[in-house]
Image (cartoon, rainbow, N blue to C red):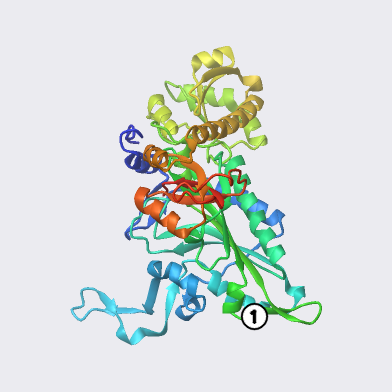
Amino acid sequence: MSKGVTPKSKDYARWYTDVITKAEMADYGPVKGTMVIRPYGFGVWESIKESFDKRFKETGHVNAYFPLFIPKSFLSKEADHIEGFAKECAVVTHSRLKSSPDGEGVVVDPDSKLEEEIIVRPTSETVIWSMYKKWINSYRDLPILINQWANVVRWEMRTRLFLRTSEFLWQEGHTAHATEQEAREESKQMLDIYQEVLEEVLAIPVLTGLKSEAERFAGAVDTYCIEAMMGDKKALQAGTSHYLGQNFAKAFDVKFQTENNKEELVYATSWGVSTRLVGALIMVHGDDKGLRLPPKVAPVQIVIIPIIKNENSMAEVEKFLKPFLAELKEIGIRFKLDDRQNISPGFKFNEWEMKGAPIRVEVGPRDMESGTIFCARRDTGEKTPYKIESAASTMSQLLEEIQKNMFNQAFEFREKNTFSTDSYAEFKNLIEKGGFIRCGWDGNPDSEAKIKEETKATIRCILLDEKIKEKNCIYSGNPTKHEVIFARAY
C-alpha cells in the first residue's frame, strides 16, 4: 500500500481520491465516468444497504426488480420528468454488432436498428407506473409499497468516484396510495428513516427539509431531503423523498375504484439513496491518515495485528487469542486477524489506519506475558491496554463509544460552521469561507437565482423547523416566506 495521502488542507479533491484508491474502496472503470467498487468499498455499501433494507421491511415495504431498459416513449409521457433527465440519458439504438469490412474490428450492424429506441434506466418512475397501470384496479389493491435495489445510468459530464458517476447503485422506492394524506405521510416516513440511518449508523448529522422549486425532483410536487456538511464545509444532498401527487398517475392513466364506486387517480411517492453515501462517509469522517469508519458500517471493526518473530511465535499468539476471538465471533463483532507473513507490523498499522478500522489490537510477547492486549482507537488515536479475559466485552462497549464520538465530532463541526445572518454583505463573506448559512428567503425564484449567480450558493433545504419568518429576505429585503439553508454543494 502506498504511503500517505495528500493533506486535506493542501488539496481536498486530491485527498478524497487518494483515500478512495489507497484504502482500496474503488477504482476507475474502463469507460470514462464509471467506477469499480472494490470488495472493501462494497462491504461498506452492504452494511449501509442492510441498515436501510431492514427498516424498509419493518415498515411494510417489499423488494422487487424492474427492467434496466425503458421505451423512449415512456419518458415523453411526463413532461417535467423528461425535461429533468433528457441531458443525462444513455440511448440504445441498435441491437448488435458485426465484423468491420476490413475484418479487424466490429461496427454497428445497420440492419439491427430498433423500431423504438431504448433508454438505459436513469430512474424507474415511468417503467414502474406502466406496470402499476396493470396492477391497480380497486382500492383493495392499494397501497403498493415497493422498493428496488438497482443500478442506474446518468451520463454525467463531470464525474467523481462515489459522488457522481455515470453508473451507480441505489435503492428507489415507488409507492401508490388512495389518498394525498397517505402519500404525504409515506414521503415523510421515508425521510425519517433516511435521517435515522445517516445519524445512527453512518454517524453523519443531517438537516431535513423541503427543496425549493428550482431544486425539486423532476415531476414531483414536493421533494423532502436530507443535507449533510462535508469536511470541506460544502453541502451534500444525501437522500431525497418525493411526493409526486397524481402526476405519474395522470401520465399513465392509473386509476382505481373507491369504496364508493367512484374512479380516482392514484397518489404516488418515490424516494432514494445511493452509493453517494459512501463518498459522504469518507468526506465527513476521513482525515490525513485516510478513512475513519463508524463501527456500524466498517467491514472490519477490529483488526488484530500480531507482533511476531517467526512461525512459532504466531502459533503462540493464536493460542493466546483463541478464547478472545471466539467471544468476538459469538457477540457478532466483525474482526480480522492479520496474520500475513513477511509484512512488517508497521506496514500493517499504516494500512489499517488508511482503511479506517475502528479498533486496532496489537499482541506481542510482552502482552502475552502480562495477559493483556493493546488497543488503538482510530477516532481519537488513544492507546490503552486491556486484560484478555474481559477484552471482548470491553471491545463491544468501546465500539459503541467510537460510534457516538464520531457522530458528536461531525455534529460539532457542522454547528461550528453554521451561521445565521440577515445581511447580504455578510452572507457573501461567509459563503467564501464555507459552511451553512441559515437565513430568510422571500420565496421568489428570482432571488434564489440571483444569489446562485452571484455566490454559487444554492438553497439546500427549506427548514422544517422554521423560526425566523419575522426577518426579511437575505437578498431582496422583502418579508421572509421561508427560513432556508444556503451553501455551496457537490
Q: Which residue ends up furthest to the left in the rendered image? A: 102
Is residue 43 visible in the rendered image? The answer is no
Tell which of 416 and 49 is nearer to you.
416
The N terminus appears in which quarter of the rendering? top left
Q: Image height check: is 179 above or below 198?
A: below
Give the residue at mark 1. Answer: 134
Tell which of 378 and 461 is nearer to you.
461
Q: Image height check: is 13 above or below 214?
A: above
Q: Position of residue 42 (x, y in %)?
A: 49, 49
Residue drawn at x 32%, y 59% is 32
Question: At label 1, which amino acid type do we have?
Answer: Lys
Residue drawn at x 49%, y 28% is 378
Q: Quadrant of residue 390?
A: top right
Q: Position of residue 413 (x, y in %)?
A: 49, 33
Residue 29 as seen in the image, left or right of residue 45 = left
Is residue 165 visible in the rendered image? The answer is yes
- SS category of the residue bearing label 1: helix
Q: Position of residue 30 (x, y in %)?
A: 32, 58
Q: Position of residue 480 (x, y in %)?
A: 54, 50
